[in-house]
Image (spheres, rainbow, N blue to C red):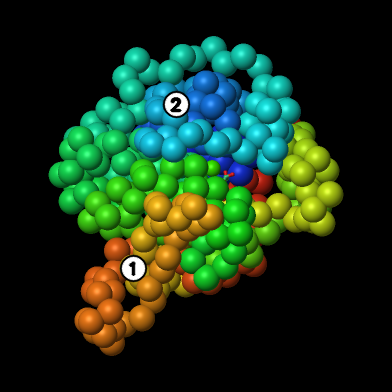
């Protein structure tokens, strides 16, 4: 059983990742923490609550997190995810409220209470994680594993030619997280760009008219029609769901140790992730290159197996007409 803490900015693909977590009998979702990213944290928090209620899981605590990046001016991605973050899909006003403690406190509390047991999956900008590990560096040794969706190592970025959105949105937080000394699996665009699901596959899931699969279909339709059409995008990139899937079956992805750092000073390259994949002992020490890897980086993915797993789990959990 994976005891999971999900830090997220829903977000269409965040919602699809959350549904995968809820559909997985081998995941115990301890709490959801929210952050500003795709849209402001007011929306991401409301969305997290509404999505949990739609899936019939209102009891999972949601903690509201940081409302802006550590240093840079906020950037959002409402042009990708719609103004409300869910592709304009209007879910009923949630009945539950967020818990009264901040997301950073929930992250600390959960990890400190259960040493070695909590997997922390971060699928938005890394602001909450950075503050948590700065406040209590011991969590780096006490967390089981940190999964991060972020970065573009050997491929172009998706928000600038060199930067991926989650890292670009809070590069200083990403810098802190990458250097905190905890075990990170970095699920970057190198893998997630290949993890596509087609419209027909979402349509097939939605045929049993469960509210969750209807919501999934509506969000993906919005994305492909309003964002994708003009850009020649015909399938949905499952960035965040692939990261979540790595918590369940890490063998869906090919991993390589790498040293990854973030550009903080570039005028054109802010938020670029720079990766060294070389065997560290082969590197000329005079070049002052890093000596130790700080992540396991995703370098390939078994797309067919991932999509089959995603569809099967969602179908089993959310296919009965209500
Ligand atoms: C990441 O950026 C966000 O827009 C998505 O939700 C995902 O977490 C992909 O670059
Ligand atoms: Ca996200």
Q: Please tell me in which quadrant of the rendered image residue 63 appears.
A: top left
Residue lying farthest to the left in this orientation: 138
Q: Secondary structure at mark 1?
A: strand
Callout 2 crowding tier (Cα within 10 Å): few <14, some 14–19, many ≥20: some
Callout 1 crowding tier (Cα within 10 Å): few <14, some 14–19, many ≥20: many
* Number of marks present in the image shown: 2
Using the rendered image of the protein, determine whether residue 209 is visible from the camera's viewpoint. Answer: yes
Residue lying farthest to the front in this orientation: 267
Q: Does the residue tagged 2 have its C-beta within 8 Å of any atom of ligand 2?
A: no
Task: Tell which of 13 and 306 is nearer to you.
Answer: 13
Residue at 66% over, 46% down = 315
Residue at 27% over, 55% down = 179
- Residue 83: x percent and y percent? 68, 28
- Residue 282: x percent and y percent? 28, 87
Residue at 42% over, 24% down = 64
- Residue 228: x percent and y percent? 78, 49
Cα distance, mark 2 to mark 1? 29 Å
57 shown above or below 199:
above
Mark number displayed over residue 67: 2
Mark number displayed over residue 259: 1
Task: Tell which of 268 and 236 is nearer to you.
Answer: 268
Task: Tell which of 298 and 250 is nearer to you.
Answer: 298
Query: Mark 2 near mark 1, Cβ–Cβ under 8 Å?
Result: no
208 shown above or below 50:
below
Q: Please tell me in which quadrant of the rendered image residue 249 appears.
A: bottom left
Residue at 52% over, 61% down = 152
Q: Looking at the figure, which quarter contains the C terminus?
A: top right
62 shown above or below 248:
above
* Mark nearer the N terminus (2 vs 1): 2
């Amino acid at each position: 059983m994976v005891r999971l803490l999900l830090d997220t900015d829903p977000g269409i693909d965040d919602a699809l990742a959350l549904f995968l977590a809820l559909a997985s009998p081998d995941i115990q979702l301890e709490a959801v923490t929210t952050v500003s990213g795709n849209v402001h944290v007011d929306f991401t928090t409301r969305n997290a609550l509404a999505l949990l209620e739609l899936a019939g899981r209102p009891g999972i605590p949601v903690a509201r997190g940081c409302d802006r990046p550590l240093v840079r001016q906020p950037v959002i991605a409402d042009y990708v995810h719609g103004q409300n973050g869910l592709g304009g899909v209007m879910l009923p006003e949630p009945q539950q409220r967020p818990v009264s403690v901040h997301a950073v406190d929930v992250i600390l509390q959960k990890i400190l209470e259960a040493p070695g047991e909590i997997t922390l999956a971060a699928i938005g900008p890394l602001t909450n994680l950075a503050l948590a590990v700065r406040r209590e560096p011991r969590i780096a040794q006490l967390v089981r594993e940190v999964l991060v969706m972020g970065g573009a190592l050997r491929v172009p970025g998706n928000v600038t030619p060199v930067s991926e959105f989650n890292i670009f949105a809070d590069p200083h937080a990403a810098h802190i997280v990458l250097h905190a000394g905890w075990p990170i699996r970095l699920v970057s665009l190198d893998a997630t760009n290949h993890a596509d699901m087609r419209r027909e596959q979402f349509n097939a899931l939605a045929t049993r008219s469960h509210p969750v699969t209807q919501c999934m279909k509506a969000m993906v339709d919005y994305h492909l029609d309003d964002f994708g059409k003009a850009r020649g995008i015909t399938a949905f990139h499952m960035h965040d769901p692939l990261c979540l899937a790595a918590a369940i079956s890490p063998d869906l992805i090919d991993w390589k140790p790498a040293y990854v750092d973030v550009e903080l000073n570039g005028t054109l390259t802010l938020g670029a992730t720079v990766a060294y994949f070389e065997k560290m002992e082969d590197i000329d020490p005079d070049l002052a290159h890093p000596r130790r890897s700080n992540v396991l980086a995703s370098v390939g993915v078994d797309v067919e197996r991932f999509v089959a797993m995603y569809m099967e789990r969602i179908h089993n959990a959310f296919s009965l007409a209500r």
